[in-house]
Each structure stands twice: as C-alpha cells, then as structure tokens.
Image (cartoon, rainbow, N blue to C red):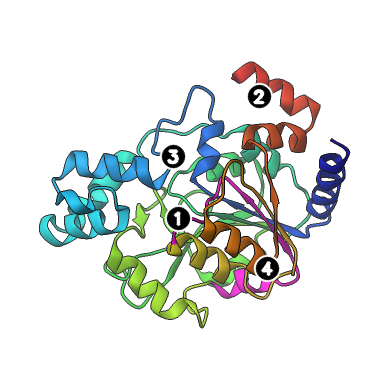
C-alpha cells in the first residue's frame, strides 16, 4: 500500500501542477452507477451495430470492418444513424469526470477516446472550455478536426487558444454534431497521415509537450488503440501511467515497455476512489 500511496502522490502532484494529460477510454463508463446506458467497449458497440444491420458472420465481431460493411451496403447515413442511436442515451458524469473538472491548473488538456458525452457534460461547470473532435473524411473531406464551444456552436480553430480546458475527442462524439470515426475508411484516412501528425490539432501538439499521460479505462490490444495512443502522446514526457487490471496481452506488455508507461494493476474504480479522495469516494460508494 505504501507503494500505491507514493505513486498516487506523484500522479496527483503532477495533476495539480498541470503536468498530466488524462486519456480516457471506453472502460471509464464502467464507473457509471448502475451500468452504462451506452456501449462501453468496441465489442459492445459492434454488437449494437450488427443487431441493426446484418453483416457477414466473419466480421460480426470486428467493429471497424462491420461499420465499413454497413457504410458500403447501407450508406454512410445508415451507419451514422446506428451510431447516433447507440449513444443517444444521456450518460451521467462519473466521479472521475467530476474530479477532472476540479483540476484548476490551466490550460488543461483532456483526451477522451470514445463517443459518449459524459466528459463534456461534466465540463459545463467550467467557464472557458471547448471541444475538439475528429471528423470523418467521408463527410468533411479535407478537414480533420472541428472545434465546438460549450453551447455546441462550431468555433474557429484560433478560439482554442483562449480556452482554459480543451477536450480532445479524436474519434468524434455523439454531441453536438454526431461526428464518428468508426469505419475502416475513416481510420485508413487518418492513419495515412497520423505519423506526420496532420490529423492532430496544433493546440494539442503544443499542450502535450513535456506532459505525462494518465491512461484510464483504456486497453491497447489492437493496433488501432496503440497507434492512436502513441501518436497523440508523441513528443510528450518520457514517463506515463496506465491503470490496467488483469492479464496483459503480449502486445499490450510490449507497448507499455516501448512507451515507458508504468502499469497500475488495480481495478479502475478502486484507483478512482483513491485518486478522488475521501469525499468523492463516499459519493461513489453510495452511488454503487
């Protein structure tokens, strides 16, 4: 326990100094009291999609391939409609989302690599913040990112320089404009350019410099998950953390070593209880 206490002290110290970029994955939705009302993993999402449109059996478990099939044979609008329906339910911010809104160091960069709107809802309590969303080339050719004010209105990129908090949604989000990167084509377009950082907003590249990343609710089992994490954290600090309970795949273990990510092997809800402090831990216990 002393080791965990020391690690938490190190992380919270960096958070308070503005030296950490929280990187949220779909597993964060496991913290929603009573269970998430929207898909909380790629596996859960692809089940939703194939329940709406039939796809070949061999790709029924592959999210990006199933999405591509629906896009090809049912039209892009059908795919967006399925995604919008899957994430239509209101997701209440969790203790973790609320904790992150209380970090006062500015500017704060939060990366949220899933399609729900819980983090944006929690950020409504802050004054100057905005959202940066990855957009599909199929719908917005030549544009990689759209910027949004708290009221959902689209903003000019230069406005991001004035925001105290930037929420970066590299895969898009249900709100405010239903932008989704989910099909093979969506990701091929991004991955073709991501190594030279073109799809990653300049302001994100600036704010990540010298900062540590804290991965919460993320897995790194697929090449896509690892590539996005690697490229978004590029040219940042040389030390990071990831809460990763359970058995690691060989690729995950190799990725952690390659990126110098220190693994925290404990359930996410337990880590959040410790991170958020006694007051929030009590709220979390009551909610559960």
Residue placed most toward the observer, 100 or 249: 249
Q: Quadrant of residue 181?
A: bottom left
Question: Which residue is depicted at the point 35% across and 78% down?
Answer: 142
| Residue 168 appears in the picture as rendered | no
Tell whether position 219 is magenta: yes
**Compared with residue 260, is residue 33 higher up or lower down, i.e. above or below?**
above
* Residue span colored magenta: 201-222
Left or right of 120? Residue 125 is right
Gap between marks 2 and 1, in whole Å? 33 Å
Determine contact: label 4, label 3, CB under 8 Å: no
Left or right of 157? Residue 5 is right
Viewport quadrant of the N terminus: top right
**Compared with residue 199, is residue 38 higher up or lower down, i.e. above or below?**
above
Viewport quadrant of the C terminus: top right
Q: Nearer the viewer, mark 4 or mark 3?
A: 3
Gap between marks 2 and 4, in whole Å? 30 Å
Which residue appears farthest toward the bottom when viewing the image?
Answer: 196
Q: Name the residue under label 3.
A: 40
Gap between marks 2 and 3, in whole Å? 19 Å
């Amino acid at each position: 326990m002393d080791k965990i206490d020391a690690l938490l002290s190190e992380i919270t110290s960096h958070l308070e100094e503005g030296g950490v970029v929280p990187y949220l994955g779909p597993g964060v939705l496991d913290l929603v009291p009573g269970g998430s009302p929207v898909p909380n993993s790629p596996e859960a999402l692809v089940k939703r999609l194939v329940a709406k449109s039939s796809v070949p059996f061999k790709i029924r478990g592959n999210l990006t391939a199933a999405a591509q099939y629906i896009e090809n044979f049912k039209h892009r609008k059908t795919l967006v409609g399925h995604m919008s329906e899957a994430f239509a339910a209101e997701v209440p911010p969790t203790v973790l989302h609320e904790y992150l809104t209380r970090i006062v160091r500015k500017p704060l960069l939060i990366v949220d690599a899933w399609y729900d709107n819980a983090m944006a809802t929690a950020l409504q309590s802050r004054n100057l913040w905005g959202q940066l969303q990855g957009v599909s080339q199929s719908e917005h050719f030549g544009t990689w990112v759209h910027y949004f004010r708290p009221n959902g209105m689209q903003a000019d990129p230069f406005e991001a320089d004035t925001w105290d908090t930037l929420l970066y949604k590299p895969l898009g989000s249900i709100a405010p404009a239903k932008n989704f990167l989910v099909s093979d084509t969506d990701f091929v377009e991004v991955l073709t350019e991501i190594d030279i950082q073109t799809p990653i907003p300049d302001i994100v590249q600036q704010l990540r410099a010298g900062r540590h990343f804290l991965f919460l609710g993320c897995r790194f089992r697929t090449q896509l998950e690892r590539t996005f994490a690697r490229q978004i954290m590029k040219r940042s600090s040389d030390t990071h953390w990831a809460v990763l309970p359970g058995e690691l795949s060989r690729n995950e273990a190799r990725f952690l070593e390659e990126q110098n990510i220190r693994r925290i092997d404990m359930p996410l809800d337990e880590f959040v209880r410790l991170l958020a402090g006694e007051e929030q831990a009590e709220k979390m216990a009551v909610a559960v």
